[in-house]
Structures are given as structure tokens and as C-alpha cells.
Image (cartoon, helix red, strand yellow):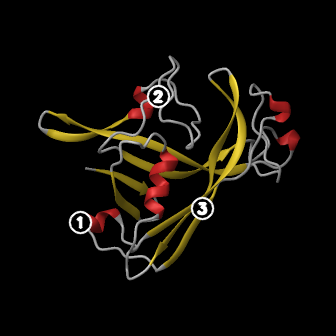
Amino acid sequence: MAIRLDVTGFFYRREIDFDASFQTVKQVMEAARQLGGAPSLDFTGETSSVVVGGTLTEVEFIKTISVTHAGGSAVSGQQRTGIAARRYANGVYLGQDDTVFFPGGDVTQGLVSPEGKKIVNAWQYYVYQPVDIDGQTMLVDVNRSMGPRRVEPYSQPFLSNPAGGARGILDEDVIVWRQVSIAISPTFPSSPDEGVGV
């Protein structure tokens, strides 16, 4: 069987042969990096120390994802389903996760960008599991069903839940990466006294 890996907006959708040893999203991405043909995937990570299960642990978060298209491999999802025909240029599609931190390590304070950015880009992944509902295959958001959403390092066994155990990556899972923009401070002052608003 297989796992599907998607990178939304980069026109990347590939299937990776399932391996029972897969426990992390990073392991699936490493397997995808080894696939031949186009589109091809590459990525980099950045290590950080966070508390996991009450212990300070060194983990890795995604830093960049790049997809290289050749031979017309950059097609929209609609084209794959036969609804519309949209093709995009061959080349490298690169997205970077902006560095942010909590001042003084205090997670009750807002995030800060060392470059002073008000809006930062962040990679987020979601894991879906296909289930049969009334004869139709539907994708269920495993992240949401495991409890409150939080940042999960892609190098950690998926999915650490508040009770302890790890689910791992299962056969037929669909892993979707999305790059989102997050406002970490106001883009305009809240009152005319503070400066020019919208």
C-alpha cells in the first residue's frame, strides 16, 4: 500500500510505498526525496530544544520545502481530476518557514520575529486517514481528532497525544503541507493616536 504526500500550492502530489517503520512525517519526506522522476522534493530542517513529555528534547522543525518541476509536471489539482487544464512553469518552487521565538522563552507572550516582520510564513502539516462513510471514502483530519491543535515537530513520532502514546504514520495516510501567513503583531495601529491606520 502507499502514503500520499501533498505540498499545497506547489503542485506536488506523490505516493510513497508504505513502510511499517514510518513513525514521523520527516521519515516519509526522506522517502519522498528518494523518488525518481518529476516533480521532485527537497527540504531542510532546523533543530530546536522544546519540552516533550516533561523533558527538554532536541527536535527538528521544517525550515524549507522545495519542489522541482520538469517536463510539465506542475499541474493543478483540477487537471488531475479532469475538470480543468492548468499548467504551471517548470522550475523550482521554494517556500521558507520564517524564524520566530517567544521573548525570554515565555510562551504566554506573543511570538517575535528577529527581522521585525509583522506577518511571517509558516509551514504546517496535517495528517488525514481515509475512512469509509456510507460507501464513500472520506479523509478524516487526524490532527483534529487527537485533541487540541499545537505545533508538532515533524521529527517527532506522530502523533504525540496528551495521554502519552504515539500513533505513528499508518498505511494510506495522506500528509498535506501548507504554507500559511500568520500576523504576529498588528499590521496597522489600533487608533489614530498611534499613527496612520487603514
Q: Point out the tag, 3 or 2, that comes first from the N-terminus.
A: 3
Q: Which residue occupies the foreground of this view, 23 or 87?
A: 23
Residue shown at 38%/83% (left/top)?
Answer: 71
Q: Is residue 50 left or right of residue 95?
A: right
Mark 3, Cα crowd under 10 Å, few <14 / some 14-19 / many 20+, is some
Residue shown at 78%/35% (left/top)?
Answer: 102
Q: Nearer the viewer, mark 3 or mark 1?
A: 3
Going by the numbered disc 1, the residue's amino acid type is Ile
Q: Which mark is residue 158?
A: none
Going by the numbered disc 2, the residue's amino acid type is Ala
Q: Which residue occupies the foreground of this view, 32 or 12?
A: 32
Q: Which residue occupies the foreground of this view, 140 or 79?
A: 140
Q: Which mark is residue 95?
A: 3
Q: CA distance from mark 3 to mark 2?
A: 29 Å
Q: Nearer the viewer, mark 1 or mark 2?
A: 2
SS at badge 1: loop
Instruction: Examine the rendered structure and indicate whether residue 97 appears above or below residue 166.
Output: below
Q: Is residue 145 left or right of residue 117?
A: left
Instruction: Examine the rendered structure and indicate whether residue 144 appears above or below residue 185.
Output: above
Which image quadrant is residue 106 in? top right
Q: CA distance from mark 1 to mark 2?
A: 39 Å
Q: CA distance from mark 3 to mark 1?
A: 27 Å
State the image coordinates of residue 130 (x, y, percent, origin top left). Answer: 27, 40
SS at badge 3: strand
Disc 3 to disc 2: CB gap under 8 Å = no
Q: Nearer the viewer, mark 3 or mark 2?
A: 2
Q: Point out the tag, 3 or 1, that comes first from the N-terminus.
A: 1
The residue identified by callout 2 is: 166
